Amino acid sequence: MNETLKQFSSSTISKALLKQIEQKAGVYKEKFGREPALMEVCGSHTMAVAKTGVKKLLAGKVKLISGPGCPVCVTDQKSIDAMIQLAESDDRIICTFGDMVRVPGTTRALIDAKTDGKDVRVVYSPSDAVEIAKENPEKQVVFLGIGFETTIPVLAVALKKADDEMVKNFSMWVTTKLVEPILRKLLNEGDVLVDALLLPGHVSIVLGKHHYQYLVDEYRVPGVICGFEPVELLSGIYKSIELLLNESPEIINSHQHVVRDEGNRQAQLMIDQYFQGCDEAWRGIGVIENSGLDIRDKYIHLNAKSRFDIKAGEPKRTKCRCGEIIRGLIPPEECNLFAKACTPINPVGPCMVSSEGSCAASYQFLREE
Amino acid sequence: MVEKISLAHGDGGELAHQLIQDVFITTFGHHDQAKLDAAILHIPQEKLTISTDSFVIKPTFFRGGNIGKLAICGTVNDIAVSGATPLYITVAFILEEGFSIRQLKEIVFSMAEEAKKANVQIVSGDTKVVERGSTDGIFINTTGIGVVKTEEMLPRKIDEQDVVIISGTIGDHGVSILSARGELGLVTELNSDCASLNDLTREVLNVSSRVKMMRDPTRGGVATTLVEICEDFNVTIEINEDTLPVKEEVEGACDILGFDPLYLANEGKLLIIVAQEDEGKVLAALRKFDIGREATTIGHVSEVKTNGRLFLKMLLGSRRRLNRLAGMQLPRIC
Amino acid sequence: MCVGVPAKIIKVDEYSAVVDVMGSKMTVGIIFIPEVKLDDYVIVHAGQAMSIVDEEYAKASIEEWRKMVNERDA
């Protein structure tokens, strides 16, 4: 198996694919008078196309637009401030994914709170936070639950564990986002020209291929579900252009070895048991109705929002253009702060520090200066 | 003898005397020097190199070493990569009240062992004990003194087409420590690469007079060390993704956690910039040693007298710039 | 994680399993893939195994692209 999977990063196949894509993109340009515009919905795709060099190699031939798929980046500043405020107490332990630690809040970041002696811990899995709660019964342990559909079932597992084992000092601060509402919003508004979508390899594990049929039925936009290795990315791009040339939109599952048509039923059930729909505020976009999930009322005892009285004020306004960047309206380089006032060491917005942020991807992997 | 360090071990009285006698003098074996407040050293040449470093590693014991071994190797290596031969080392301990004396003995023993291996003498030492909670078990400072022949002093002028060589696989120490901490649930049987490099540096300097620079890429990893070289010496270096030696365990751990081996710490790797014509000689010299067997060329100097930048040539043919590590590496969300 | 790291199941318990990723090991939850067996390869995200990798499909994808490369070279 390892040998098979290693081939997904084969440079021989990748280089051949690149040639094929260039040829197909040329045909597209001849036919439609411009290069095909593909949006990679997932933040890890954004990172992967930058890191492997695919984006650079296809520059001027295929337009790759970063989409709204980085969970930290799409989190509204007020929610970020609230999560940081949670840490400002000596009787709490805040557990988080690594990505959140350096995200700038209006006053400071979690890492600054940690430096100040507050107990902020990076965990790999949300369930580890429940273990930390069991080991520290005298403290309140809060997990910062952010993420899309891949992460939400994993959050549910931690909620289940805390509930089953009656861990009273554990709670979760949830601000999750769903892929469908934001894609509908982008496609309805039509501010950004997207011909086809590269659909997220791992969100799709949970949702399945059939979930995306609305893209074809309602928007006539094709999509290809693909993985993250060079060959997978390139084949996703190739198939997208092929679909565009055929002018027959459909959803292709190019990640069939891990994504099933109907998704992962167990994960869907877990989401449904512990979460209910809610309106979510998106960074630089505003509130989108039913675009996120929060803990079900039945499990309100595990909801940090009802356990703690956190009132974040109006965030400080900055010139950060994350909002436009996550909608694909501008590339990071067009933000005046990029690589000047905003760098990974001194970030202004979350896109510069998240491991899936498009600014971080551009800063680390695309800049030569 | 009591089994744990108490504040009395640091007050200069009977317990302090016992600790010094039983733990340090017997192990380090310098009975005469211990009677003086300062060591008298015999220096064969005029040019001295000196380097100091403090070690605060968590956990104190890890696969392939402990804080004591690390404290010797770290300072030996800092001296050795300057082209010098390390001769003497001083050690200073800061111990937390309650620290196990058995563990202290183990640490001191590995220091003596590593010093012997590296052919350096431990000539002066100090111990302080602080209250419980004021430190994390044990901190060690070591200072090394070495001598260097004028004609072997590094760095030398870096030229275009000079090659960049690494003495073995990268990121081993970083992943081993990450695993030993147990915080992220990762378990590996990988050893830290913690080792003294002075035999390697000596051999390399013996076979080539065209070595431009040597460094041991510790914290921040190979990428950060090379970025510093690029900036300090105004050169552009290009390294190749497909030539980087990385152990499978390290690759696996990095894949799980979203780390980059180029930025993980090494404690027993030598990075060498050498003129292209001596590449083969240097590689052969390194490969004579167990810890240099996987030595390989990873890149070259592509431009000099420029604004110093480091590039990674990627598998698919494009290149990207590598910067210093921004903050610490954190596991990604997804 | 969101990359295609193959994690091999080397021990299965009721709700968890030990996976090996090229020599690095980790305990992961298997609540989403209760059917998982020893020696299966899985995709892991934040401590939970999310999907079992289907080798036949993986081979088929690779074959598809390999063929394309060969045709081009022929």
Image (tube, coloured by chain):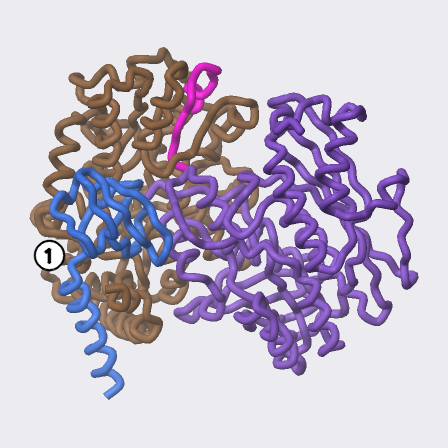
Foreground of the two, A77 or B132:
B132
| Picture residue at 29% right of the left edge, 26% below the top | A174
Q: Secondary structure at mark 1?
A: loop
| Picture residue at 19% right of the left edge, 64% below the top | C58
Foreground of the two, A140 or B176:
B176
Q: Residue B277 lies in what quarter of the image? A: bottom right
Residue B81 vertical position relative to residue B204 in the rendered view, above or below: above
**From which residue to which does the magenta span run?**
A84-98
Farthest bottom residue?
C74
Q: What color does chain C have in the rendering?
A: blue
- Is residue A287 found left or right of B220 in the rendered image? left
What residue sits right under mark 1 in the picture? A250
Q: What color does chain A have in the rendering?
A: brown
Q: Position of residue B207 (x, y in %)?
A: 71, 78
Asked whether residue A348 is in view, the answer is: yes
Q: Position of residue B100 (x, y in %)?
A: 60, 32
Foreground of the two, A280 or B266:
B266
- Is residue A156 found left or right of A6 in the rendered image? left
- Is residue B218 found left or right of A39 in the rendered image? right
Q: Position of residue A65 (x, y in %)?
A: 32, 52
Q: Is residue A96 magenta?
A: yes
Q: Which quadrant of the figure contains the C terminus of chain A?
A: bottom right
Foreground of the two, B317 or B266:
B266
Subunit of label 1: A
| Picture residue at 46% right of the left edge, 62% below the top | B246
Asked whether residue B161 is in view, the answer is: no
Q: Residue A56 lies in what quarter of the image? A: bottom left
Amino acid on which the number 1 mark rests in the picture: Glu
| Picture residue at 34% right of the left edge, 45% below the top | A329
Residue B250 vertical position relative to residue A346 in the rendered view, above or below: below
